[in-house]
Amino acid sequence: MKFQKPSKVQERALPLLISNPYSSSNHLTNSSPRNMVGQSQSGTGKTAAFVLTMLSRIDYATDAVQAICLAPTRELARQIVDVVKQMGKFTPVRVTLAIREAVKTSQVLKDHIVVGTPGTVMDLMKRKSLGATHVNVFVLDEADNMLDLQGMGEQSMRVKKFEPSR
């Protein structure tokens, strides 16, 4: 992908993002995973940083969704899926693009990574097509833009907190 060295945002974020949050050598108390907010100009490699994080946290032997990435637009979701495919081309990663015209809400998703818009991802969860039991990475790309767009911030938080009714 023509990376020669990490950008400033990657240099600061990657050690935190790809370290094992459950290892005893981690400085975090109670071995809890860490949340992170990264802000940097366009073209500085933020997407590559969070995609690498998602790829590093997947158990490829488990046929279940393990990472969810929400994007404010279908176009951005498509771009992120392309990056996942490019960075994961030497892995068995499976990724679903969860936008209205790309996924059937009746199909049960078992791909490792789901990238989509908040409304479609929430719809899939409500219909029990997307289970979040095995999710260990949750990414909000362009979270500032999603919070500015009417209802998208609220939808994103509902996805994060979603618990299916029993």
Image (cartoon, rainbow, N blue to C red):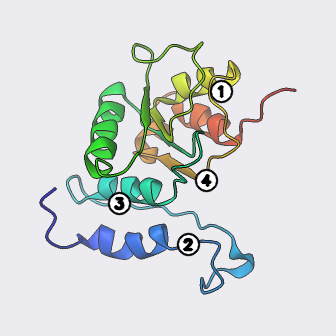
Circle 1 sits in a helix, a strand or a loop, which is it? helix
Residue that appears at 83% across and 26% down: 165
The residue labelled by disc 1 is 125
| First in residue order: circle 4 vs circle 2 | 2
Neighbor class of circle 3 (other Cα within 10 Å; few <14, some 14-19, many 20+) is many
Q: Which numbered disc covers residue 20? A: 2
Query: Is residue 82 depicted above or below 45 in this figure?
Result: above
Q: Where is residue 164 in the image (x, y as percent from the top left)?
A: 78, 29
Circle 4 sits in a helix, a strand or a loop, which is it? loop
Q: Which numbered disc covers residue 49? A: 3
Alpha carbons under labels 3 and 2: distance apart: 15 Å
| Amino acid bearing label 3 | Ala
Alpha carbons under labels 4 and 2: distance apart: 12 Å
Query: Is residue 89 depicted above or below 22 in this figure?
Result: above
Residue contact between numbered discs 3 and 4, judged by CB atoms under 8 Å: no
Residue contact between numbered discs 4 and 1, judged by CB atoms under 8 Å: no
| First in residue order: circle 4 vs circle 1 | 1
Residue that appears at 87% across and 26% down: 166
Neighbor class of circle 4 (other Cα within 10 Å; few <14, some 14-19, many 20+) is some
Badge nearest the viewer, 3 or 4: 4
Alpha carbons under labels 3 and 4: distance apart: 16 Å
Q: Position of residue 34 (x, y in %)?
A: 59, 67
